[in-house]
Image (cartoon, rainbow, N blue to C red):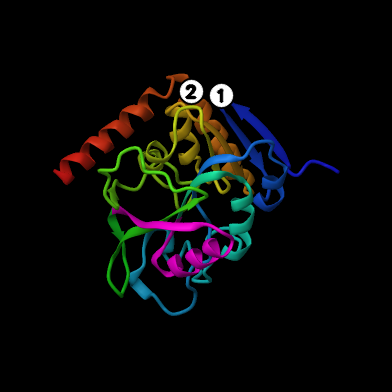
Amino acid sequence: MGVSWLRREVIGSCTLYLGDMRDVLPALDEKADLVVTDAPYKLTSGGNAGASMSGKFDAEAYDNSGVLMASIAWQDMGGPIYRACKPNADVYVMCNDKHVGAAQVAFLGVGFKFHNLLTWDKGAPTRNKYYMKNQEYTLYFWRGHARTINFPGSKQEFSFPRPSGLGWHRTPKPVPLMAHYILNSSCPDDLVLDPFFGTGSTLLAAMAHGRRAVGIECNELFFEQTCNRLRAAMVDGFDGIRAECAAAEAAQKRRAA
């Protein structure tokens, strides 16, 4: 039996695989303590947005087909992720408002249990004719025995602006957001898995906070750029990332006060 991936890179405490998560996950040697991922999904297609859409949805950048990047169906990802987790594990899966129901059904159907629906307030909204979209959603599941989060005072909403300087990816997520989930649902040296790592925000957050990480990505450009991003962050020992995450957490506490 041949290898299940096209390329494998080890950078510090992180192992990255170029390939399809459905092929790679069954071949991993160790199960994950935690999964944090921004899964790729097909957007609603059709209609005529006219001048109401901008940025990544501008008519010159997006053909309104519903496809921003390669994706797989929710029902095809739940099972492989479930089997890649340890008997007791937490799972955070991001999606937009239109996919909350389908994602929840798919993950509940393979054995996960549902904790909570979390939100990310990204600040500058995406223009839309039917209310401006300033939030995305995170479904928080668990497998096995439910564990109290490390910081029970955390609220459902996390506010942090969309990251900049990552023009090679259309939907980057902020490292402090992923760090928030990782710090709440894991311990140092735990294994954090992201089966769709994109820009590597989950991997960076895990490495910066003493966790081990495994990431999978099928897009060769994203894979290469993320490898470069991880290597660059290692140069200063992740000090910049930890400082950014700490500032974000402090801002959350001030808003909650």
Residue sticking out furthest to the left? 257
Magenta range: 94-122
Instruction: Indicate whether residue 61 is drawn in magenta.
Output: no
Q: Label 2, label 1: how many angstroms apart (C-alpha)? A: 8 Å
Q: What SS does tag 1 mark?
A: loop
Instruction: Indicate whether residue 107 is drawn in magenta.
Output: yes
Q: Which residue is mark 2?
A: 234
Question: Which percent across, then down, holds residue 28?
Answer: 68, 40
**Residues packed near mark 2 inside 10 Å, few (<14), some (14 to 19) or many (20 plus):** some
Q: Amino acid at mark 2?
A: Met
Identify the residue at image location x=31%, y=74%. Answer: 129
Vertical placement of residue 187 versus 99, above or below: above
Question: Which percent across, then down, holds residue 16?
Answer: 62, 36
Identify the residue at image location x=30%, y=75%. Answer: 130
Q: Which residue is mark 1?
A: 12
- Between circles 2 and 1, the one closer to the viewer is 1
Vertical placement of residue 106 versus 115, above or below: below
Q: Amino acid at mark 1?
A: Gly
From the viewer's perspective, tell me whether residue 28 is left or right of residue 142.
right
Given residues 44 and 148, the one toward you in this image is: 148
Question: Which percent across, then down, holds residue 145?
Answer: 48, 47
Q: Quadrant of the C terminus?
A: top left
Instruction: Mark 2 or mark 1: name the one nearer the start of the chain.
Output: 1
> Is there a contact, CB below 8 Å, between mark 2 and mark 1?
yes
